[in-house]
Image (cartoon, rainbow, N blue to C red):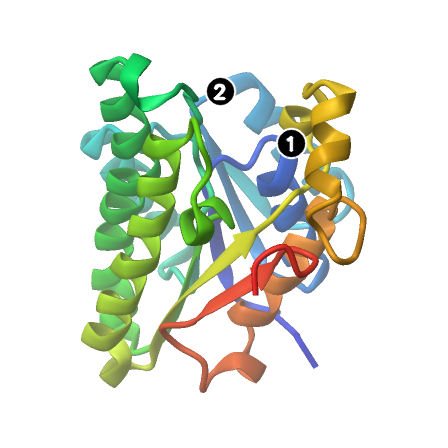
Amino acid sequence: MFNLNGRVAIVTGASRGIGRAISLALAERGATLIVTDILTDPVRAFADELRGQGRTAEAFTLDVTDSASIEAAVQGVLEKFDRVDVLVNNAGIARDQLLMRMKREDWDLVVRLNLTGAFACTQAVLRPMLKQRSGRIVSISSVVGQMGNAGQSNYAASKAGLIGFSKAVAREVAGRNITVNVVAPGLIDTDMTRALPEAVRTEWVSKVPLARFGSPEDVAAAVCFLATDEAAYITGQVLAVNGGMYM
């Protein structure tokens, strides 16, 4: 069960945090990993680490806001492996501020990277997926995209947009055996959340019925499930990994 042997998987924003955990989990299940990130040295080091564990992995420098960068990376994958089976749209950024104080450039950056970047990466892999008549696309949204959060209107809009985008694309490509789903994490223990003041962390955890932060591995397990044959009849869905924070 949950075997990904022979599948070629691209993960964006793979060098740390949730993206790293997703990549490790996919590799453990046998996938050939294409780890991508805008940070060249960390993603190359991560690919070396995966190969050191006996996994098949390649690294590509990828800027999801740059169409040429995306096309070059996908073309490189096709030249080497002749297929793309899984795309995980994980790359993301936050620029938090109350709306009245938010700079237009911070709105534009977050939407361009989190939402338009996922659009561009998905569009780039669809042609080979349509040709091979199979594929799995999973985008990482957020509980904030479902319930909102003060000071994160740009981030919430981009993550909510991923949900609508994924549902629409799921309808377009279902006839070719391509599924498109979303994983929406809640409070996850990452470098970003560890940097929060302890009082803020405590307040947020008080809103979680399971009374703890989730781990990147919790998110990775959900992504892996949606990438497997066992999830072949699931498309256009949002799998919430939030400890009950939003139901």
Which residue lies under the disc numbered 2?
A: 39
Mark earlier in primary sequence (1, 2): 2
Q: Position of residue 79 (x, y in %)?
A: 33, 49
Circle 2: residue type: Leu
Q: Position of residue 113 (x, y in %)?
A: 32, 32
Quadrant in the picture for the N terminus: bottom right
Residue drawn at (79%, 57%) of the image? 210
Looking at the image, can residue 27 be seen? no
Residue drawn at (51%, 58%) of the image? 183
Dot 2 falls on a residue whose secondary structure is loop
Looking at the image, do the residues carrying marks 1 and 2 touch, with CB atoms under 8 Å apart?
A: no
Query: Based on the displayed image, in which of its 4 quarters is residue 158 positioned?
Result: top left
Q: Position of residue 121 (x, y in %)?
A: 29, 46
Which residue lies under the disc numbered 1?
A: 46
Please state if 246 lies on the left or on the right of 114 as rendered: right
* Label total for image: 2
Residue drawn at (55%, 50%) of the image? 33
Separation (CA) of disc 1 from disc 2:
11 Å
- Give the mark toward the camera: 1 or 2: 2
Instruction: Please rate how many residues cluster around mark 1, counting C-alpha atoms within 10 Å: few if below 14, some from 14 to 19, many from 20.
Output: many
Residue drawn at (80%, 47%) of the image? 212
Circle 1: residue type: Phe
Using the image, determine if residue 229 lies above or below residue 11.
Answer: below
